[in-house]
Image: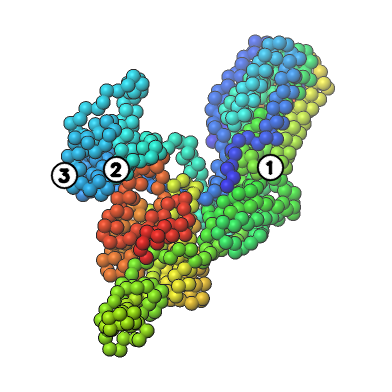
Amino acid sequence: MNVRPTLLVLGLAAFAGGVAALFGVLEIALSQSIAVIVGLLAVVIGIRSLLNRGDANRTPTPDPERRTAVPVPGETLAEAIGAFRTAKTSYTPTSRRTTDGLRAAAIAALTRFDGRTEDEAAQQLEDGTWTDDPVAAAFLSTSLDPPSRSVRDRLAAITGRKSRFYTQVRHAVAAIAVIGYESGDAAARSLPRYDRTDDERADTDRAARTTTKAVDGISRTRERSTDYWYGIGVVALFAVGIGVVSESPAVVLAGVVGVGYAAFARALEPPELELSVDRQLSDAEPVPGDDIDVTVTITNERDAFVPDLRFVDGVPSGLAVTDGSSRLGTALRPGESVTLEYTAAVRRGSHEFDPALAVVRDLSRSTEREYLVGSETTVVCEPELRPVAAPVPLRATAASFSGRLETAEGGAGTTFHSVREYRKSDPLSRVDWNRHAKTGDLATLEFHEERAARVVVLVDARKAAHLAPEPDATNAVDRSVTAAGRIAASLLAEGDTVGLAGLGPVDRDGGTEAGRESCWLAPASGRHHEVQFAELLATHPQFSAVPPADEGRWLWQLRTIRRRLSAETQIVFLTPLCDYVSADVARRLDAHGHPVTVVSPDPTADETVGERLARVARRVRRFDLQRAGIPVVDWPADESIDEVFARHSAGGRR
Amino acid sequence: MTEITRRPTARSSVVAAGAALVAVFAAGTGGTSALAFAAFGLVVFAVGLGIGHGRAVDAGALVLFFGVVVGGLETTTVEPTVVGTIATVVAWDVAHGAIDLGDQLGREAETGRLEAVQVVSSLLVGLLSGTAGYAVYVVGGEGQPIGAVVLLVVAAVLIVVGFGSRNAGKSARRRRNRTRSP
């Protein structure tokens, strides 16, 4: 800008003139009124500039202490309704789309859980006989009139048309969710909320990672002016102006103080940072759920005072800080170091610390520089391979090796199967001697033959499977991976052979998937295999604790897995069943002759209409799979896998 | 898991409130209207600081400063006004520091040293410029020609406006400019 130098030169000239006049070298005849005008001018300029003061300008810091939040199934109503959409539904405006979608959901639920045909269900919807909630009945029917509303509802309706629509949607969803339950308890019958409040979602605004880039050493990412002192010079001028106008030396001196601060704000530059960060862990290989102590030593390697350092450690997303703080604000003399200590809870997986964020300001805080300080530290947390207390629900298909899986065929074994006529070469031990003693006939006892199963545990780690009932709760993939380890441990202990496969994006940083294999471990047994299994579960990038950014090519991966599976291999598929793909994968594998058992960690919640509808959709999917002959073991969020398997085996099937 | 409390840090907030209180007392020596202005400013300032609202802190500090100026207009002694101004600016500065720290690091983080450096540096700058101005006032005394005063004010306006950008090294001269103006 060319105005500035001019103004400066003029200002310096005026200064020189003023000094000259002070010492009597220059005689200037000015009246008091001119002094007043000049003073007023200073005040006006001051006020004008002050109005331009913007909002605080500072580097926002991310929240690496937190775990990466994953969505709750059915975050929005539109998404939940989309699960029920059939090819028939064409484009319609939003409100119609909601009604149509809810109608489709009601029909889906009625046909599955109430034993209606599609036409009957449609008829019931029209009559409103499907529910005893008059509001819901009227909302999904074209012919029924809504019930007369109470005064309170009328008042609410005046405040906005939307609120009435919301109430109707809430009633309809609550009614759909209880279809199939004889008498739902009070909680199931209560109305869901329409949406979560902003408070509950605001947390996710801040990034959970300091950066996704790898940083070696220290690198400056940004420099900005904080506008911290903006306005101080102007206020000072204002005071000087008033002081001159009113001939008050005290006020002029007040202005002088302000100008001193204005000068301070502009005089300094933040130091160039040379930090070294050293991270020590109390335990580099903890088990999931353990707390580890992290000690970070930060050293100022440069020969200059760092007056203002704000440090945020790059805690990986699989770690959550439970005690202490991973942030520090300090000043550092040359060569000085400070330590930062905190405790973090570790989840399973391989966690690499992100570069730490260091924000430096100069002494006057008016300029801010942002640095990323890299320091490689990795925590590997292998899941425990502890056998499940109850037998793993497997399908009765087996390999030809002897083992402990009961098959449907008769032969040698321990559980009674049938009695048949004696044939030559039947072993004497299996002849039914009691019958021979009574009748003189020879008969042979048959037992359920026990063979070894060949199982591949397939973990659904697609983006759509990273779901949790609460943003911070253990997500479905984590539960699946933990369960995979435990299932493998119990099967291996029983003498079965177990393999591992994964479905989902391999690369977390949005890069190409070329050159990186999705997880595959062929079924085998033995101690070495078990160790390999645990290692893969902990470190394979497909099961990383960081939720993937985009959906991988699951179809392509599924084909590869299918090609690798040998005959007689059965599959335990761990998936939350929250989108059509998961059910589709199970069906495809089953259709190719690999008996599939679905173990499904339940990530659904029922707070809002979308969440409750997503839960219905999952129930429908589960029902459809079971109808297709694929057993589904539902695993609620508040139960352990042992309880679930125990209940399932008590249900009478293995 | 610990939640981050993104509120102004406690220590700095206390220091800022204390400084603002000092400013109110300094303004109070100038009369009741000055005291009223300053007290109102203090309330707005404290509320802004409590909820971490930067604009409210700005407004409160401005009203507080206005109170100090009104007090200065009504008295003949300059000392309370100078002290009040320094206290106001320190309060404002430390309050903004507390809000920034609260937002960037949260209340749980250890920030004591940073805050100490901040308070001391802020106070030191105020004392230095205040002492310099006061010294010139005392040595120079009364009776400068009005033309010199006006020229110096014009110089101040032009230079402050001209200094749009940060320019190390020239600040000393600007400070000298102002110290002569009374």
What residue did someone put label 3 on?
A: A119
Q: Position of residue A416 (x, y in %)?
A: 34, 73
The residue to which callout 1 is attached is B111
Please indicate, yes or no, whether residue A88 appears anywhere in the rendered image.
Answer: no
Amino acid type at image mark 2: Ile
- Chain letter, disc 1 residue: B
What amino acid type is highlighted by mark number 3?
Answer: Asp
Residue A29 sits in which quadrant?
top right
Do marks 1 and 2 share a subunit? Answer: no
Read off the residue under disc 2: A179
Residue B76 in view, yes or no = yes
Q: Which is more foreground, mark 1 or mark 3?
A: 3
Badge nearest the viewer, 2 or 3: 2
Query: What percent of the width, then of the height, locates residue A549?
Result: 42, 54
x, y percentage for residue A367?
62, 41
Residue at 75 percent across and 49 percent down: it is A333
Identity of the amino acid at label 1? Thr
Between A136 and A12, the residue placed more toward the observer is: A136
Q: How many marks?
A: 3
- Which chain does the numbered disc 3 sit on? A
